[in-house]
Each structure stands twice: as structure tokens, then as C-alpha cells.
Image: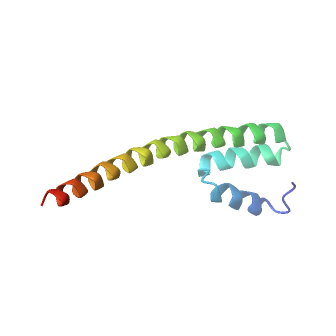
């Protein structure tokens, strides 16, 4: 996919959460037509995003468990009254 303007590519990088420093590095590689380097940098960012996703997924699982336990406790307490 060829970008008609560097701004389109830059905006896309921003939209996916790539910081300015990494974005500049990717855009530099892109301007030099080093597409293999662009690909590697994008894969590196994807790996970081996936790690964060898995961390957040574990947090959600823990929250779900705590919510379940407290809802169960509240249900048990209200039944005792």
C-alpha cells in the first residue's frame, strides 16, 4: 500500500499509538524506501501492543473474579437477613 502523502502515513502511525520518536524513525525508513525496516518497526510496535493487551486482559479477569466474589458475598449476606 503506497501512501500518497507522508501526512497520511504519519496520521496512521499516530492513530495506532506510536510515539513521536518511533514515528520519526519509521517515517525516515519509509522515506528511504527501506520497507523491510518499516515492517520490522511495525512488528516491534505490534508486539508491545499485544503485551499490553495481555496485561490488561489479565487485569480484567482479576476484576471479573473480584466482582463475582463480592456479588456472591452480597447475595449471601442478603439471604441471611
Q: How many marks?
A: 0
Residue drawn at the location 77% of the way across and 40% of the way down: 39
62 and 34: which one is in front? 62
Q: What is the residue that sits farthest to the left in this orientation? A: 81
**In the depicted view, which residue is nearer to us: 37 or 56?**
56
The percent position of residue 49, horizontal first and vertical second, equals 59, 44
Task: Tell which of 70 and 59 is nearer to you.
Answer: 70
Quadrant (top left, top right, bottom left, bottom right) of the N terminus: bottom right
Residue at image point 86% right, 62% down: 4
Q: Please say if 31 is above or below 43.
A: below
Identify which residue is drawn at 87% across, 55% down.
2
Tell me, yes or no, if residue 34 can be seen here: no
Question: 57 or 42: which is nearer to us?
Answer: 57
Indicate the quadrant where residue 45 lies.
Answer: top right
x%, y% of residue 64?
39, 50
Q: Is residue 34 left or right of residue 67?
A: right
Q: Residue 69, position in %: x, y?
A: 30, 48
User: Position of 71 compared to 37: left or right?
Assistant: left
Q: Where residue 11 sits in the image (x, y, percent)?
A: 69, 61
Q: Is residue 35 left or right of residue 50?
A: right
Q: Quadrant of the C terminus?
A: bottom left
Q: Is residue 79 visible?
A: yes
Amino acid at each position: 500500500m503506497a501512501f500518497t502523502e507522508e501526512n497520511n502515513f504519519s496520521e496512521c502511525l499516530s492513530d495506532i499509538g506510536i510515539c513521536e520518536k518511533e514515528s520519526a524513525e519509521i517515517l525516515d525508513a519509509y522515506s528511504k524506501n527501506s520497507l523491510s525496516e518499516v515492517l520490522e518497526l511495525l512488528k516491534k510496535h505490534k508486539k508491545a501492543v499485544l503485551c499490553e493487551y495481555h496485561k490488561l486482559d489479565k487485569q480484567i479477569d482479576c476484576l471479573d473474579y473480584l466482582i463475582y466474589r463480592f456479588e456472591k458475598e452480597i447475595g449471601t449476606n442478603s439471604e441471611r437477613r
